[in-house]
Image (cartoon, rainbow, N blue to C red):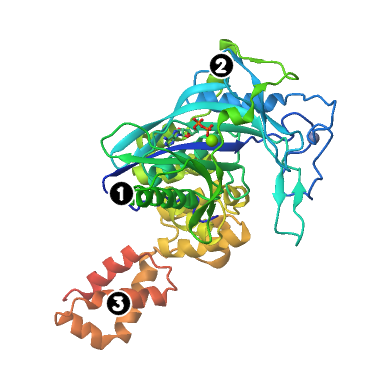
Amino acid sequence: MSQDTDEGQSESLSYGPWEPVIGLEVHAQLLTNSKLFCACSASFGAEPNAHTCPVCMGFPGVLPVLNERALEFSLRAGVATGCRIPPVARWSRKNYFYPDLPKGYQVSMFDEPLAVEGYVDIDTPDGLKRVRLTRIHMEEDAGKSIHDAHENHSLIDLNRTGVALMEIVSEPDISSPTEAGAYLRSLRSIVQYLEVCDGNMDEGSFRCDANVSIRRTGTTELGTRTETKNMNSFRSVERAIDFEIRRQIDLLEDGGRVVQETRSWDADRSRSTPMRSKEHAHDYRYFPEPDLLPLETSSERVEEIRSELPELPRARRARFVERYELPEYDAEVLTARRDLADYFEAAVGAHDNSKGISNWVMGDILRLVREGHLETALVIEKWPVSAEHLAGLVRLIDDGTISGKIAKTVFEEMHDTQDAPADIVERKGLRQVTDEGAITSAVDTVLEQQADKVAEYRAGKEQLLGFFVGQVMKATAGKANPKAVNEILRARLAPS
Ligand code: ADP
Ligand code: MG
Ligand code: ZN
């Protein structure tokens, strides 16, 4: 996944008399340096098993020590999504056997989670929709089994074991694949704004399990659901849900029934296959974690976190429309990422032409981002054109120093050299010619050379004006002010 991160898929899907019911469970990796209960690094991409210690490998007799930052981050997410924070949350052990789970259990939360009853707002063709959150809880990640590296063996990498996650569980309020995509984009944008998760679906730091059932439109009883895993892009999530809805419709319409199970998405074949029959909570033998204290959160702490929240994406988007008089669409694109919105605002702060600056960001900058197949965050971080330089470029257009056409050349040069736009204009002699005398003499030269065309024009072939403008621009290497060229040409060509 890369280029499909920011753009919504808005095909409208119809399922006849069937209504999809979708609830999403999102696992977001918290942006802590170390793991949830030990000092091992939580960074991605190290040599297998380089980031391990007796605690995360589950040696007997070791004790977990809570990473306070992970708690802080999860509380921040809970407060930002309107959750109620119960005064006490408790850790539980979720017991199951799997080769990549050395302890034989995952430390998670069960009946007393960290945050409950929140919401995420999304836009739908029918207007604003509020998707309720059931809960947010913390847990540790499992390791990774690698089945395709060796012919006869499976390999285990425990670098991810014990990494801090928060799980965000929605109510089954989502009604289409497109809404699921909108929900995930909103939620990802929020956790990125909060700087608690990098939202990278490709590396698995933001992943989603999709619970899907269907029912006859107009009925209220929930159908049997399946859960699909292993989608690593927004588009895959949307496709996997659409596939599952159609699969269930076919089953029911053929007189069959849906079996509750966990399925795995295969992006290459655009289909899912069954992984295992659905486990139930009682299969996990949840019980309270004896080695960790309950988490007590005072209402003062909640208020303190609330007072420190940054402006969130939807609020920022509304402010962009209001304050900068931007179209809704521009505001949405610009505020989807905090760093991009910051970049825009820094540029507008340096030169007060919000629409002009928005056009550059929305156009040339995001085009280069997409062509580079990079996520916006990476590009803005490493983007060679500073906000001040972009502002400077727009200022040069606005004060008539350069034409919009020349600005494209300057922009490319800024991108390649990181030089200030004014320096580039001077160095390359790109200053727009506005001096009337210079333009008039260029016009006269062209008209002398094109005496035949001038006669045709005067005889009524007025569409030749564009031709003359082009010739003058050519004679001035694109630097003449096109408006002045037009005026002077008209005056010179007027019947004497
Ligand atoms: P589990 O933890 O076993 O997966 P939960 O009851 O916590 O089960 O539900 C997990 C997710 O499944 C939630 O997001 C919830 O909204 C969703 N869900 C529950 N029932 C249905 C259903 N019938 N159809 C679609 N989604 C459902
Ligand atoms: Mg589940
Ligand atoms: Zn460790």
Q: Which mark is in front, 2 or 1?
A: 1
In the image, the residue with mark 3 has its CB under 8 Å from the nearest atom of ligand 1:
no
Q: Quadrant of residue 304?
A: top right
Name the residue carrying label 3. 468
Mark 2 residue crowding within 10 angstroms, few (<14) / some (14–19) / many (20+): some
As drawn, the residue found furthest toward the front would be 255
User: What is the x, y in percent for residue 305?
Assistant: 57, 20
- SS for dot 1: loop
Which badge, 2 or 3, is on the more N-terminal residue? 2
Q: Name the residue: 19% across, 80% down.
A: 457
Q: Is residue 108 left or right of residue 428?
A: right
User: What is the x, y in percent for residue 348?
Assistant: 46, 42
Name the residue carrying label 2. 302
Q: Are marks 1 and 3 in contact (CB under 8 Å)?
A: no
User: How far apart are the alpha carbons under marks 1 and 3?
Assistant: 58 Å
Q: Quadrant of the N terminus?
A: bottom right
User: What is the x, y in percent for residue 199?
Assistant: 57, 42
The disc labelled 1 sits on which kind of residue?
Tyr
Mark 1 residue crowding within 10 angstroms, few (<14) / some (14–19) / many (20+): some
* Front one among 139 and 429: 139
User: How far apart are the alpha carbons under marks 2 and 3?
Assistant: 69 Å
Q: Is residue 68 left or right of residue 354?
A: right
Quarter of the rendered structure image containing ligand 3: top right
Q: In the figure, 257 relative to 72: above or below?
A: below
* Front one among 491 and 235: 235
